[in-house]
Amino acid sequence: MIIMNNISKRYPNGSVALTNINVHISKGEFVFVVGPSGAGKSTFIKMLFREVLPSSGELFVNGRNVVDMERSEVPYLRRSLGIVFQDYRLLPQKTVHDNVAFAMEVIEAPYREIQKRVNHVLDLVGLRHKARVYPGELSGGEQQRIAIARAIVNNPVLLIADEPTGNLDPDTSWDIMKIFSRVNRNGTTIIMATHDKDIVDSMNKRVIAVENGTIVRDEVKGVYGYEA
Amino acid sequence: MIIMNNISKRYPNGSVALTNINVHISKGEFVFVVGPSGAGKSTFIKMLFREVLPSSGELFVNGRNVVDMERSEVPYLRRSLGIVFQDYRLLPQKTVHDNVAFAMEVIEAPYREIQKRVNHVLDLVGLRHKARVYPGELSGGEQQRIAIARAIVNNPVLLIADEPTGNLDPDTSWDIMKIFSRVNRNGTTIIMATHDKDIVDSMNKRVIAVENGTIVRDEVKGVYGYEA
Amino acid sequence: MRLRTLEYFVRETFSSIRHNGLMGFASMSTVALSLLILGLFLIMVLNLNHMASTLESQVQITVYLEDSVSNAGITRLANEFADMEGVKKVTYVDKKQAMERFKQRLGEQQGLLTALENTNPLPNSFEIQVDKPERIKMLAPEISELPGVENARFGQEVVEQLFTLTKIVRIGGVVLILFLALAAIFIIANTIRLTVFARRREVSIMKYVGATDWFIRWPFLLEGMVLGLAGAFIAVLLLAEAYSALLSQAQATLAFLPLIPRQPFLTQVSAVLLASGTAIGALGSAISLRKFLDV
Amino acid sequence: MRLRTLEYFVRETFSSIRHNGLMGFASMSTVALSLLILGLFLIMVLNLNHMASTLESQVQITVYLEDSVSNAGITRLANEFADMEGVKKVTYVDKKQAMERFKQRLGEQQGLLTALENTNPLPNSFEIQVDKPERIKMLAPEISELPGVENARFGQEVVEQLFTLTKIVRIGGVVLILFLALAAIFIIANTIRLTVFARRREVSIMKYVGATDWFIRWPFLLEGMVLGLAGAFIAVLLLAEAYSALLSQAQATLAFLPLIPRQPFLTQVSAVLLASGTAIGALGSAISLRKFLDV
Ligand SMILES: Nc1ncnc2c1ncn2[C@@H]1O[C@H](COP(=O)(O)OP(=O)(O)OP(=O)(O)O)[C@@H](O)[C@H]1O
Ligand SMILES: Nc1ncnc2c1ncn2[C@@H]1O[C@H](COP(=O)(O)OP(=O)(O)OP(=O)(O)O)[C@@H](O)[C@H]1O
Ligand SMILES: [Mg+2]
Ligand SMILES: [Mg+2]
């Protein structure tokens, strides 16, 4: 599903976010990416959907060469993914319903299918009653859950989430993790950057620990490992 | 320091965020506001600096009547506060240094004083080396720490923080809490909304729990209380 | 493209116009004002040009004949003139008609004529109108050479001043209109660029969700077209109103000014403006968008 | 305000212009283009007005005298005319001079004069110039009544057409300039509003950190002024260049057109445009900001 060979990333302003990353992730895996603030987790994740291009190295996602990809192919790469952004990225001028529906509109799904799926995922994240309001009228955690709903609405082959529970209370976080587990059991590969020790420790999944731009640990059934 | 009498808040779109809130907070207290996502914590906090006006009830902050305040008085209310926003609110076109310095420019502090304080608080949050970059070039956690630096740079009498550790790893979170404790010992009142069970449980401070817009618990030495 | 998607684009377009009230208003009113100014000057320049043409078409060669030319000779000359290249109209003016006209022209100094008593010293003459003004200079000397012709005149100096003036009006007019058109396009494009700029984050979010460039572009294009068309429509309405008012005003007090009649002139100008408004709106959106699509 | 804060505002202004490249460019070029158009038409209308005045000032009353009036009578009349209200200049033209002029005017039809032999049927006359054109209609009948005066003429019809025309040029010119000025202000304000709109979040963040309205407003005001001034400066440069070119062109081929000389005309127009640009820039920023300050 994901192959990273010798990936490095140096931002234009000179800061080096990643050096020499080598990772293989197979279809159906559930992977946590952990590490201190500024370690390079978001950079790692952003490369997967080509928000950020690596400075050097090879990157394949879902069989596609992300680095040498044609500009016109990028949308199709992204459609096969579900992405939860650290800063949500909801469209401020669309209602909650339309924000989620938008991800299906772009793949030109039929109207009835859209209604069904959107209502279903809004139910999953517990925000069906907020369908008609705008993102600006939601609490931080509610926006985060809408972003999650949008990411899973298309049954992506790969779900990428950057701190999807950063603004959620533990109860709601667990609800989200249950959804992720179910999506994962249905065959979706999941990569999730997180600071949530409790979740990582109890889920018992593969953990990739990043520090200072390099992978310091990669365990099949790992723990968070940063003691509070 | 803070007096809330019978405060209710109903947003224009009809959602009721708070009902009948009565709270007294004295100078020098350290208060956690906890509760599930969408409970009304941010609304509670936003009223303190008049981002949101209560629909009914009385609110006094630092001796000022927030509800009946003149429009021209608002800046002076806010200058006596330090605020960490859930969505950071950094100025995208100013460097990290200038973002923090801006809070001192508005009170027309002398140049030398600004340089000294800004460097000092950037050291505190561990980001002095990022002083020359723009917020867009920072990781989520780094932006959050800059927001914290800006909030404390003016030695506010009241520090208001909305999930200041939502995007931070536990280690960095603890560093931040140490800074908060020190600021608190120097006499600053602190109100902090958070989902971080570990922090609330270990700090042993006053906890106000909000659920569905009402206060369900207010303990002097409380715990987080929402089990994962 | 599926019908469903087309429908989505249309819905999207109008919902976006509703939500971006300020920006929509800014673009639309800028289009309206720019095209109003452009249209105003288009009408002005076209009318000036029309006046110039009217003036020019009144320039003619006057051919004075020797008194000795017989009636047959006059007919022959008339045919000869009519056959010349570029000659549009040949009018014969005999001594008597010439005297009548002279009396009229003399106006306040008629006393002078009593001194002439019954003699009529004016010659017979032809007035020749040609297809284009430049022809006059070529024909005049040629005609002077013909037997029976005393001389051929066309008020050299005045006519040349007139030609310079009309040339200036024409060139100036074209330059002005081109400049105004460019300015209008530029200003409108600027405005649209700003409105798109204000929504660059929105565009980037759409890209991250997997929307193709065209999927994002279509609603913007449609929106630009709708706003451009609406702006142009306002401009056209105001212009038509103003020109009609001017015409009826002119009929009352300025009958001597040769203005272009209302129809089909206004329809043509309107069509140009409506098309421009729509095109600029669509192009402006599309071009401005390009930069922000690149994420 | 402290010196330190002033310094901060100035630094802030220029750093903001640097960072908001697109928006700064959009505002500046819109100001430049709008003022360029405005300036162009200001110059055009002022020149047309100047031409109209020149034409009008050439209109005069011609007073024809009876042949019986003595030299003493002529002197008396001359004094009488000169004493009339509004009379600027009185010129006496005797029979001989009149004949000379007539000969010139006749041009191509001089043959006519031979028939007159040596008699001169033209009367003595006065030409009277007045301070303003409206005066002519009042004075002419009054003068006709005087003893020794045969009649007083001023080419009624042509003059009235001329007056209508110049009146239209004047009123039309003022209306046009007012309209263009309003349009320019509106378009510029629109553009600035959009640039401010794109930065509304920035403004609200400043408010939340405790900045007063004026603290936020000053850099925006200064920025508006700098951009407005820069835009106006570009417009002024282009206009001055164009007008100078037009003048030297006109001297060569259009000497008969009375254009306004370069100085101090251009300096005055430039001053107006520079002041307008700066003012519109500052006001546009300030007004647009108002809405977003209210948080
Ligand atoms: N601007 C707004 N307009 C309308 N409703 C709003 C607005 N802001 C918040 N709400 C609603 O008010 C309720 C409380 O929101 P608030 O932001 O206070 O929650 P919160 O406790 O901070 O949640 P979180 O932990 O997710 O940040 C929610 O149901 C939310 O949808
Ligand atoms: N656009 C950018 N331009 C320049 N430097 C950047 C940019 N984005 C991130 N960085 C830098 O790269 C490093 C890694 O950033 P990244 O966002 O990957 O961290 P992270 O692990 O996600 O941190 P967090 O947990 O705080 O979100 C940081 O030092 C950051 O300052
Ligand atoms: Mg991150
Ligand atoms: Mg909140």
Image (cartoon, coloured by chain):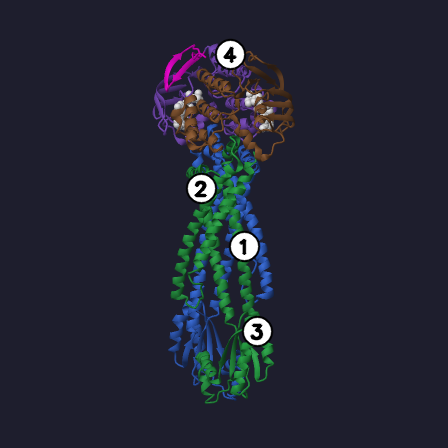
Chain colours: A brown, B purple, C green, D blue
Residue on which the image places disc 3:
C85
Residue on which the image places disc 2:
C24
Give the class, few, some or many, for how many residues have Cα within 10 Å of label 2's Cα (few <14, many ≥20): many
Amino acid under label 1? Leu
Amino acid under label 3? Glu
- Percent x, y of residue C41: 48, 56
Looking at the rendered image, the quarter that the C terminus of chain C falls into is top right
Is B20 or B120 nearer to us in this picture? Answer: B20
Is C193 or D1 nearer to us in this picture? Answer: C193
Amino acid under label 4? Ser
**Element under disc 2:** helix
Q: CA distance from mark 4 to mark 2?
A: 52 Å
Q: Are marks 4 and 3 in contact (CB under 8 Å)?
A: no
Q: Nearer the viewer, mark 1 or mark 3?
A: 3
Residue on which the image places disc 4:
A202
- Percent x, y of residue A190: 53, 20
- Percent x, y of residue B100: 54, 26
**Element under disc 1:** helix
Q: Which residues are magenta?
A: B205-228
Picture disc at residue C178: 1
Q: CA distance from mark 4 to mark 3?
A: 103 Å
Label 2 vs 3, first from the N-terminus: 2
The answer as to whether callout 4 falls within 8 Å of ligand 2 is: no
Is D80 or C48 nearer to us in this picture? Answer: C48
Question: What is the number of callouts on the image?
Answer: 4
Is the residue B92 above or below the residue D67 in the image?
Answer: above
Q: CA distance from mark 2 to mark 3?
A: 58 Å
Establish whether labels 1 and 3 are both on one chain: yes
Q: CA distance from mark 1 to mark 4?
A: 72 Å
